[in-house]
Amino acid sequence: MFYMGLHNLPKISQSLLGHGKRPDTPTAVISRATTPHQRTIVAPLNEISEAVARAELHAPSLIIVGDCVKQRDELAWFEEKPLFGQKIGITRPAAQAEPQIRKAFELGAQPILMPAIQIEPIKDWSEVDATLQRLDEFNWLVFTSVNGVEAFLSRLWEKGGDARQLAGMKIATIGTSTADALSKYHLRADLIPDEFRAEALAKAMAPHVKDQKVLWARASRGREVLPQELTAAGATVKELVVYQNLDAESFSGDALQALDDRQLNWIGLSSPSIARRMAALLPDSAKEQLGKTLRIASISPVTSAAAKEAGLPVHAEATTFTWDGIFEAIEAATS
């Protein structure tokens, strides 16, 4: 085995041949080993230099010479990962993208962080603080994002309250990720719809909210399906903005470089606002590659509709409306 010998490969192979190695000795060169960029070239010793030159492998590389190379077909588990070699744009806010970055690596993909929105605290907490003083007036508390859970419940704690102030309320969440966020505060969701979208949440709540007061801890912008449907079902809905959902101004240098080099394979869209902002941020050169070297994966039909309305074609759509569902849709589309 030779470490960091890529540029000297012709000399190495000729020296080995000159000292008696058989010309047909199995030889492998592994470029960028253990990363999603890993590439492996296998050839007889007397042909390996030409094969590597044709493949345009990059340093750092390992050179392995000997019969052990024959075991590669049985042991090449890393390159068999379902999304091996794919570069996927993660469009969540940077501070919240760690689970998706970790998942991408687990599947063999290279995550490229390219947030399309930013999550910021609201500037004026007066309405939130006043509402926290009268939580006993409400029958239901609704969360449609992890951000809403964090913003609302952390503010409750900061103002001297805790979970006891929610004792008379039932809690509904739009999906399992939002429900899981409650566990940090030792709370459980009473209602989670089968499909993780506002329409399904409203349908699940409708039979239970007639003549009831519902408090929705929400973002500064978003769809109005939930309050409209719950009001139609006989509820009184108070919408309480607990965090700001803002457009990102631009992509990072790494993301722009990946787009310029046509190295990005997929972009995941996880909300209508992200879809619309992505359409505005993508340079024309990248849009020209959509459906060719670059494809779009959407988290749900609602997000797909927003993407298409903004001019972005959707090439894969999740059936489970989570980021794991996005990865599954990409896997299905690339298999």
Image (cartoon, helix red, strand yellow):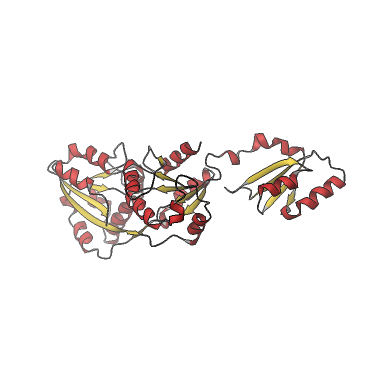
Q: Which of 284 and 243 is in front in this view?
A: 284
Q: Please indicate, yes or no, whether residue 213 appears anywhere in the rendered image.
A: yes
Q: In the figure, residue 201 lies in which quadrant? A: top left
Q: Quadrant of residue 151?
A: bottom left
Q: Position of residue 192 (x, y in %)?
A: 29, 40
Residue 245 locus on image (x, y percent) = 31, 57
x, y percent for residue 225: 23, 46
Report if residue 169 is visible in the image: no
The number of numbered discs placed on residues in the rendered structure image is 0
Residue 262 against residue 67 in the figure, above or below: below
Q: Which of 243 and 27 is in front in this view?
A: 27
Residue drawn at (30%, 53%) of the image: 148
Q: Which residue lies furthest to the top in this view?
A: 74
Q: Is residue 86 left or right of residue 326?
A: right
- Horizontal side, residue 233 vs residue 89: left or right: left
Q: Position of residue 216 (x, y in %)?
A: 23, 50
- Please tell me which residue lies in front, 227 or 152: 227
